[in-house]
Image (cartoon, rainbow, N blue to C red):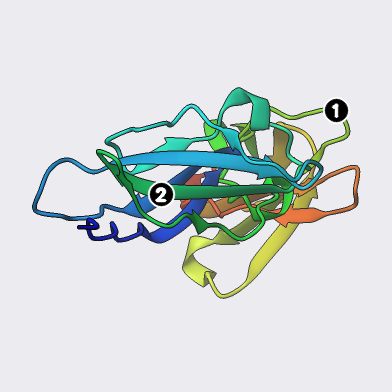
Amino acid sequence: ESSPHLPAPKDVMIYSYNFHSWLRWSPVKVDRGLVLYTVHFKTGAFNWWDEMNCTRIAQTECSFPWSLKERRWTVFLRVRAELGQETSDWVETDPFVAERNTTIGPPKVNSVTVSSDSLVISVTPPFGSETGDFLQYHVLYWENATSTTKKEMKTSNTLFKIENLKELTLYCFRIRVELMTHSDLQLFGLQSVPECSRTSVS
């Protein structure tokens, strides 16, 4: 008598943050043993499925291997559930291109040096850049008392200065990254949480 077919994994999604990417799905629940999962990938250039580093795993996520680190590649993934000799149908993802589909986090603020009329800010980019990348920081800043009026400056330096400030005044700022790639794609990152510093007296 034929055994019932295993249900396929649901909620199959690629998550990607700062170019680190992984596939996640909801666990398949059956009452007769531990379900394992196998993940395959293929790229837009070659139309055949290949094994990833996730064959018969118990976890419900699988991180992309080093071989898929090319940000420009179009990647497809598929996953299925397995229990003994039984397998579910494959569930395939939409095409994924890291350069378009990753989420870029905010830059890290290392230090803020205050003077009477400026803030000097040092930041670290959210990911290691590749040849051809151009990173620009969008800095939004405002006087805390009049937070409706915000000013913006753009810079490609990781050390920059917000100038012409009033002395002994609290200023707040948020920063986000804009990545321009050699293929003229623009990718905007998430904004940092506001940080505030008071200027000194001259």
* Residue 108 locus on image (x, y percent): 54, 35
Q: Is residue 58 left or right of residue 43?
A: left
Among all residues in the image, which is located at the extreme front? 1
- The local secondary structure at tag 2 comes to strand
Among all residues in the image, which is located at the extreme bottom? 148
First in sequence: mark 1 vs mark 2: 2
Residue 7 position (above or below residue 56): below
- Mark whose residue sits in front, 1 or 2: 2
* Residue 163 locus on image (x, y percent): 72, 46
Kind of residue indicated by mark 1: Thr
Q: Residues within 10 Å of mark 1 (few under 14, many from 20)?
A: few
Q: Nearer the viewer, residue 200 or 22?
A: 22
Q: Nearer the viewer, residue 64 or 110?
A: 64
Q: Which residue is mark 2?
A: 80
Q: Residues within 10 Å of mark 2 (few under 14, many from 20)?
A: many
* Residue 3 locus on image (x, y percent): 22, 56
Q: Is residue 10 left or right of residue 2?
A: right
Q: Are marks 1 and 2 in contact (CB under 8 Å)?
A: no
Q: Which residue is mark 1?
A: 131
**Residue displayed at 63% across by 32% down:** 127
**Residue displayed at 35% across by 33% down:** 56
Kind of residue indicated by mark 2: Arg
- The local secondary structure at tag 1 comes to loop
**Residue displayed at 47% across by 56% down:** 13
Q: Nearer the viewer, residue 103 or 38?
A: 38
Which picture quadrant has residue 4? bottom left
Give the label on residue 122, or none.
none
